[in-house]
Amino acid sequence: MEDTKPTAVALGLGLREPFADGDFAQWIRHFELCASANGWQDTIKAKKLPTLLKGDALLMFFELPEQVRNNYQDLVDALKAQLNPPVHKAMR
């Protein structure tokens, strides 16, 4: 008898609510856990990530060059830089 249990990819394990504001670095860590659980490669992650962006985050995505939008790591780095800029301590 063939096992008809759905696979993790078919289940879409752990997909999050869309990101509109807040801590993008924290949100993307959870997205990457979900992507790993679903067996997504970087090309799939680059296609799925923008579908979960809302508001200003989505507008920022559209302003990125196509080359960046199509490369998952470049996309994440660019969004992190815009949505969670580094905080510099005041110089004494």
Image (spheres, rainbow, N blue to C red):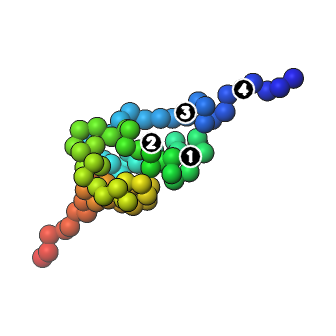
Looking at the image, is mark 4 or mark 3 earlier in the sequence? 4
Residue type of the residue flagged with mark 3: Gly
Q: Which residue is mark 4?
A: 5
- Alpha-carbon distance for marks 4 and 2? 24 Å
The residue positioned 72% from the left and 26% from the top of the image is: 5
Looking at the image, is mark 1 or mark 3 earlier in the sequence? 3
Q: Is residue 1 above or below residue 57?
A: above
Question: Which of the 4 image quarters holds residue 69?
Answer: bottom left
Could you tell me which secondary element the residue under label 1 belongs to? loop
Residue type of the residue flagged with mark 2: Lys
Q: Which residue is mark 3?
A: 12
Q: Which residue is mark 1?
A: 40
Question: Which of the 4 image quarters holds residue 22?
Answer: top left
- Alpha-carbon distance for marks 3 and 2? 11 Å
Residue type of the residue flagged with mark 1: Trp
Q: Is residue 4 above or below residue 84?
A: above
Q: Can residue 77 be seen at all in this image of the molecule?
A: yes
Place of residue 83 in the rendered image (x, y in percent of width and height, measured from the top left): 26, 52
The residue positioned 30% from the left and 58% from the top of the image is: 65
- Alpha-carbon distance for marks 4 and 3? 14 Å
Could you tell me which secondary element the residue under label 3 belongs to? loop
- The quadrant of the image that shows the N terminus is top right
Q: Can residue 30 be seen at all in this image of the molecule?
A: no
Alpha-carbon neighbours of circle 4 within 10 Å: few (<14), some, or many (≥20)?
few
**Front disc: 3 or 2:** 2
Q: Which residue is mark 2?
A: 48
Alpha-carbon neighbours of circle 2 within 10 Å: few (<14), some, or many (≥20)?
some
In the rendered view, does 46 fall on the left or right side of 19?
right
Pick out the residue farthest to the front: 66
In the rendered view, does 87 fall on the left or right side of 9?
left
Please report contact status of discs 1 and 2: CB closer than 8 Å, yes or no.
Answer: yes
